[in-house]
Image (tube, rainbow, N blue to C red):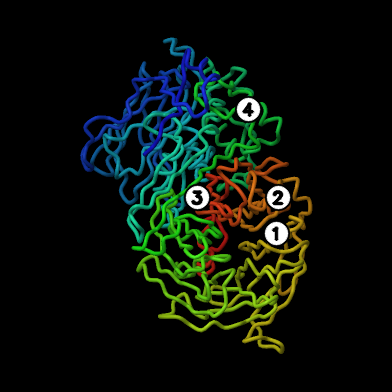
Amino acid sequence: MIGNSFARLTGSKRNLLALMASSAVFTAGCANMATTASNPTPLGQAATLSGKIHGGNQPVVGATVNLYFSGLKGGTPAAIAATTTTDTAGSFAFSKDPVNGNTDTGNTFSCPTGYNPLVYVISKGGNTQNNGDPTQTNAAAAFISVYGNCQGLSAANHVDMTEVTTVATMAAVQQFFNPFGTINDAIVFDGTGQQSNIVTQFPATIALLADPSAGTAVTSTTLTAGTGNINPAVTVTATPEPGKVNLLANILSACINQATGAAANCSSLFTAAVPPNTGFTTNFGNSSFAPAIDTLQAIYYMLTNPSSGGTSNVATLFGLAGGVSGPYQPALATQPTDWTIALNYTSTSTCGTTTGGSGGFISGPIDINIDAADNVWIANSQAGTGNLSEISGAGVPTTCVFLGSGGSQGGATIDSANNVWIGSGANLYRYNPTTTVATTFPVTVSPIGVTADGVGNVYFTAVNGAVGSLYQLPGAAGSGGAVTALQISGNVGAHPVRLMPDFQGNAVQGNIFVTSGTTSVAEVSPSTGSGNLNGFLTSSIPTSGNSYGISISHDNRLFISSIDSGAIDGLVLSAGTYTNISGFPFTTPGTIGIATPTSISVDGRLNVWIPNNTNGTGTGSVSELASQGTATGLSPSTGFQKDASYLTSGRALAVDQAGNVWVAGDGTNFITEIVGAGVPLFQPYAIGLKNGRFQTIP
């Protein structure tokens, strides 16, 4: 159930806020808001889509509202399909013609033929003072909201466009939004199946942050088990940062509620909302963005450059929110380090005996992986009952299977056939999400790290005494049954927790890199020379500290985190030689909040993402480092800081195909999503290797 206890406040209600606890329930400032239109129209018939616009507590009158279709990169461009104007109550409507491909005129549109675009609306201008003066038009007032995919729209679809829904929508779509494209304010995506799937999930993600039909922030949402291999009683609770959403909405409202866009608050907003460095932080290749001229561009800049260029700009923006006098309450009362928005997914459900062990759906998550459909797979480490769990990209629990009694000891992976692997006890398990069949691979040792290459092989590490070894399961991604593990190195260090293959060609066996827990990384390479073990030779690469996390970019750059010093190495790999990338090694980790890093990942622009582990207690954080060794998009002292209820003791991290950054919290019963903070990355890694698209923007 979606909770709507965060709302717009008016009059005396604002004065009461300081006397009430932050958990108090507030009613909407506009009590007569419609949430849905009555008498929903069946699909295939004409429909009227309704909406209204509120700037703070005032209707926006005479605003121009454009209805857009999302576009395809290199294909059908984004398009304005219909246009209308808000009335004296701030209301508007569009008529959907049931015949696809009809000509769009006025406020009437029809779905295009050949593809099913996302339909969204953007409002600009209008009188925000509710005084009936047509000369007082605030050109800086701009809002966005999403209706959904065109073919599924009916008269049940209603949007209340407010600063809150604008913040929530932009957070979800930011990596697909281009404010200065051929058509300004276009949502554009790749026509691949992966990207199409991402776009269909946008409305569900937005609804976890704000209620589009009421215009208010959401406190939490209980997500029930979807169709899949799962006990139907399993639930997940998604909890956003409603105080952060309301704070951002209040900042926008400070400009929107001015008589004109030339007012001082708008000027302060547009100056302090510094555009992002597009080379690092966005999905689009623009060399630079001009300063914002409306609130839609401003919130886009704040989310894609969440440190706003420095603490002084963050302070300026925070000051615009107005504290308890802002229209959306409760809002975050202390100045944040950045503007990122987190979603916490927690579950106290056990999976039950029908689908596996009695362990928790999310319990001690130790690794996290993204599959080709952008679903999130969680390897749980709960002793004796650790499960392999799956949620959709919008948090719906869909799979929970019991695979061994040991619980994952270090990792999981997705292979080139989209099977999911997890180690438990003295076995590796391959789970096929399509057939729901699990195959046991007895390996006689206790697997720690697991990875897969693009040609069907699976690899894992284990430790015998103080000796770390690397094993290969040849062709295991497509084998009809279990295959015998082949030891290919007996010298990868005593703590071989993370490992990854590199790219040597679509059908060529690559090298495997393994962290050691000491000041080196092992490189295990195919070799016919002397000293090899079952056709592989092990060599050592020096590192700046005790290596723990590892990631490889699409151009075979190797990034390594040191769990002791926090230093980050960045190396160019070329024919057995290793040279430092400019700016690396990065040996001042405290400047961006790196502390006890246990994992490392790259996104589609080669930004390096690092979850920070604080030995099981305290507030968690995630740090980001540009691939040239410079801090980008974050507070220089703390990284992306979150309250411990949202993020603590990061263990593993993955960036998905929408740019969401997912973090597994060590020893907790939740995982964390930082919405849209990264640049989209093709997933999973092994399929990217197979298809020649590994570690690139999808």
Residue type highlighted by circle 4: Leu
Q: Which of the two discs, 2 and 1, labels the residue nearer the N terminus?
A: 1
Task: Say whether residue 650 is left or right of residue 393.
Answer: right
Residue nearer the viewer, 423 or 548: 423
Q: Which of the two discs, 1 and 4, labels the residue nearer the N terminus?
A: 4
Q: CA distance from mark 3 to mark 4?
A: 27 Å
Residue 559 placement (x, y as % from top left): 68, 61
Q: Residue furthest bottom?
A: 530
Question: Residue at the location (34% across, 63% down)?
Answer: 354
Q: Which residue is mark 3?
A: 658
Residue type highlighted by circle 2: Ile
- Packing grade of label 4 (10 A; few <14, some 14-19, many >=20) is many
Mark seen at residue 561: 1
Residue type highlighted by circle 1: Ser
Q: Which of the two discs, 4 and 2, labels the residue nearer the N terminus?
A: 4
Question: Residue at the location (51% across, 16% down)?
Answer: 16
Q: Which of the two discs, 3 and 4, labels the residue nearer the N terminus?
A: 4
Q: Is residue 279 visible?
A: no
Cβ atoms under marks 4 and 2 closer than 8 Å: no
Q: Which of the two discs, 1 and 3, labels the residue nearer the N terminus?
A: 1
Disc 2 secondary structure class = loop
- Packing grade of label 1 (10 A; few <14, some 14-19, many >=20) is many
Mark seen at residue 475: none
Above or below 427: residue 605: above
- Packing grade of label 3 (10 A; few <14, some 14-19, many >=20) is many
Residue 581's quadrant in the figure?
A: bottom right
Q: CA distance from mark 2 to mark 1?
A: 10 Å
Q: Which residue is mark 4?
A: 317
- Report the mark closest to the observer, 3 or 2: 2
